[in-house]
Image (cartoon, coloured by chain):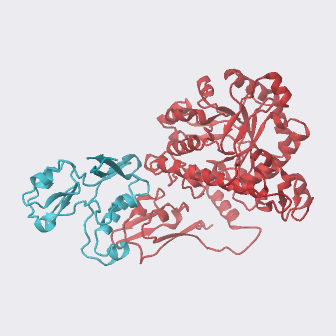
Chain colours: A red, B cyan
Amino acid sequence: MAIPKIVPDFRVIRDENLCINCQACCRVCSNDTHSFDQNIAKIISDHRKCVGCHFCEEICSTGALTIEKCYSQIRENFNWNEVDFKNLMKQAHSGGILLTGMGNDRPWINYFDHIVLNASQVTNPSIDPLREPMEIKTFIGRKPDSIEQLKKEKKLPILLETEIPVLFSAMSYGSISLNACKSIAAAAWEAKTYWNTGEGGLPESLKKFVSRTIVQVASGRFGVDARYLNEASAIEIKIGQGAKPGIGGHLPGEKVTADISAARKIPEGTDAISPAPHHDIYSIEDLKQLIYALKETVDYKKPVGVKVAAVHNIAPIVSGIVRAGADFVTIDGFRGGTGAAPVVIRNNVGIPIEIAIATVDSRLRQEGIRNHASIIAAGGIRSSADVVKAIALGADAVYIGTATLVALGCHICQKCYTGKCNWGIATQDPYLTRRLNPEIGKRRLTNLLRAWALEIKEMMGGMGINAIESLRGNRDQLRGIGLNDKELALLGIKHAGDAW
Amino acid sequence: MVKNSKRKTINTIIAREEFCIGCRLCEIACITAHSKTKNIIKAFKGEYPLPDSAIVFEEKGHISFALQCRHCDDALCVECCITGAMTKKDGKVIYRKELCVGCWMCVMVCSFGVISPDITASKIKSKCDFCLETGKPACVEICPNEALVLKEDNEQD
């Protein structure tokens, strides 16, 4: 049998009229795509090695490089598309599970793109955020049932206060570089929002940002001790993540450097394996025990939340989590990213975040426990419009993960699991991590949050809403386009054109 | 405001090795900035000979950095220059090729090793002039990771 060559994904197009043979591309590519051939005094690019990260394209000072999709057309077949074909070829060759990074890239329906926002016309005035106060400050945590209860208890609940309802999602030191963590933590500090340690523990050099840190307690329990829990602003128990619900994690030993071993409190060079389940949580009652064990540890001074992936029975699951005592619940939709996940899991497991938020919010409202916990939506938030739509569907705040990394340079090449990230994000290689200057990273993330805050205010102003509280769960501000009755019912919104 | 007070801005290029990614674009920018056409493609495709880069690039393992003339306050190269080819101008050490006789004393005394001799011409190969013509050093402008930054010190006279 012939051994088929796997057709490359990309082609490196080099304009010889512009290339000055400076060899910057040869020096920077971690995949060794470019090499200088002295015999012909030219740079040769091996298309097969290109992963499409576009780092060389950005570094090229004459603009001689363009990375293009490789158009090697197999006979058109809607059943056997190029991706499935190539994956099958790779598996027939390797016999292993195919890995990938980032979130689901398949063309499943994106409900955010089928939802439009309202604006005030005649019957109520719109608000100009430049001239009138506009509040997007958000409080995350358990809220009292009534003012009477608050007056009786004479104690304000413990809440996380964030200036913008956008938080940085859990990405561990290990899965991303220390410089990436530093950029995110410093930006969270600057923008007065929160960042999440993931399950990588809290590195010593990031302790100064600890009052803007949500620490995670995941199935591997890496880096968890009483001090870690007590220092942070909040604790998040990670049950699952959107890209790989029901799947554990595995940080290979070669990535466990001295710094990471100190942060995770594991021996240097050992594999950091996070089991698929928490072996002490096999039911809601077990989760309750862990929540209260953590609350006892921090003397009930910090909110404790739970992060789950959006799966089929998400509404009753979240209802159970809220009843188990969680102060906030993070729901990660199936477009959520990851450092490494099996392709088949990432592309096929879970449900869209839009439907998950809407059904969870409706369910908690029906049961009268919506105020017992905040909902943080994660997975697939790409713009401020998505933030507004998620909040109007019922979320309290959103987590951004992929959007954060894109702001730091990521071009979503999905090769995080190789540890060769040219942008210095998903790597521990000292040659590569230095490419992310945390000062630049912090500036870019702060800019992003500032821009989103301005846009959120503009959109709210258009709707005639001057506080984010009035937008939360305000599904009357949303209309669906091109959705069927069942989808509209699940999202709890009307179709465009349906009026009062 | 005090009358007759002069503010002097002293700029220094700082190399931060922790952020240098070793792309060597600073050298390309330096050559372009000192070429005849000042255009990267015209210079590299059409000019001969090209000027040498005034940057010394050091690399060992993953650690690298780019170093230019430090424009020392008490510049030894200026002090030892027998013809006055090395002079101080606006706080910067400037090299005037037409006066140089190629004794290479400056090469000998430079403690940073940023002056290299041109053996064929009996002159100095290249010397950082802080891009005084354009105002902002080209290497700092092009550095993609802010590993070369301009530090501005305002001194009150």
Q: Quadrant of residue B145?
A: bottom left
Q: Which quadrant would residue A51 be assigned to in this image?
A: bottom right
Query: On the rendered image, what quadrant is the N terminus of chain A found in?
Result: bottom right
- Relative depth, front residue between A416 and A98: A416
Question: Residue at position x 56%, y 43% from top?
Answer: A190
Task: In this rendered view, identify the residue nearer to me: B75 or A77.
Answer: B75
Is residue A377 shown to the viewer in this render?
yes
Compared across the picture, whether A402 is left or right of A477 comes to: left
The vertical placement of B66 against A361, above or below, is: below
Q: Residue at x 11, y 52 (%)?
A: B79
- The reply to whether residue A101 is in sight is no
Is residue A56 left or right of A374 when viewed as pictured? Answer: left
- Which x, y percent locates residue A482? 85, 65
Residue A200, percent from left and from top: 58, 36
**Vertical placement of A265 versus A422: above or below?**
above
Please identify the quadrant where the C terminus of chain A is shown. Answer: bottom right
Where is A149 relative to A275, above or below?
above
Residue A381 is left or right of residue A484, and the answer is: left
Tally the marks: 0
Q: Is residue A182 left or right of residue A124?
A: left
Which of A301 and A378 lies nearest the eye of the viewer? A301
Residue A366's image quarter? top right
Q: Residue at x 91, y 57 (%)?
A: A486
In the rendering, at what x and y percent does residue A458 appear?
70, 57
Residue A174, given in percent of the width and then of the height, sits at: 55, 41
